[in-house]
Amino acid sequence: MKKITLLFIAITALASGAASADQITDNLKQKLKSAIPNETPKSITKTPIPGLYEANYGMQIYYISEDGNYIVDGEIINLATRTSLTSSSISGARKDKIASMPADQTIVFPAKGDTKHVITVFTDIDCGYCRKLHNQMAEYNGLGIEVRYMLFPRAGLQSASYNKAVSSWCASDQQSELTKAKNGKEITMAECNNPVAAQYLLGQEVGVTGTPAIITEGGQIIPGYRKPADMLQALNQLAAAQ
């Protein structure tokens, strides 16, 4: 009987602890709803810092005290590893956003041989460094890097760049037409059902402010042009750090 009683006490304590954790989360949701009324956090989780929780809003991370009285908008760095917990959470959200656009809705330049890395590149047809990257495509692919293009006309959805992006997407040979457009050659203007506007808006959502913007498989963002060998080195380093 004594063993049964002790077991009951232990189970009751565990249940009480779980309920307490749920109560904390519910309380924090209510506090956040008052502070940020138009948005709902995707998750609320404990951080390694006692009494501090992460409120994940996708591309925006907040930290909130356990009592819900304090919110911190900032970055948490692990001094031992020199890594950012905040950046890691944002990268995870960015990865999920990128995954919402299927590969068949991008213009793909596959790796030659074994695929070592897959990158998503937000590109603008009239961007000089985008052109430089594109003209080295064979080298990227030869190093085992698959490039998936999302079209990001920086001048906006009513621009000539947007029209060229749409025409490239609608071409029977997307790769060839995109290459011609990037090198300033005349292309056949066309219209069809296309994802260009959705890709442009997605780029803004995941933090693209310039092109080319390179998104890794882990959701990290590499801004700007990188030489093929430098790109491979950066991708290897980021993959090893995960």
Image (tube, rainbow, N blue to C red):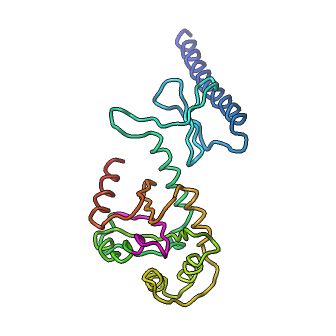
Q: Residue furthest top?
A: 2
x, y percent for residue 99: 52, 61
Q: Which residues are magenta?
A: 117-131
x, y percent for residue 235: 33, 58
x, y percent for residue 41: 63, 42
Give the residue at x 60% y 63%. Answer: 201
**Residue 128 placement: quadrant:** bottom left
User: Left of 151 or right of it: where is 29?
Assistant: right
Image height of 167 relative to 68, above or below: below
Look at the image and tell me in which quarter the N terminus lies: top right
Q: Is residue 105 magenta?
A: no
x, y percent for residue 27: 68, 28
Give the residue at x 34% y 38%. Answer: 82
189 or 127, which is in the foreground? 127
Give the residue at x 55% y 78%. Answer: 165
Image height of 200 relative to 166, above or below: above
Figure label count: 0
User: Left of 48 or right of it: where is 152?
Assistant: right
Give the residue at x 36% y 48%. Answer: 242
Q: Is residue 119 magenta?
A: yes
Image height of 87 relative to 191, above or below: above
227 or 52, which is in the foreground? 227
8 or 52, which is in the foreground? 52
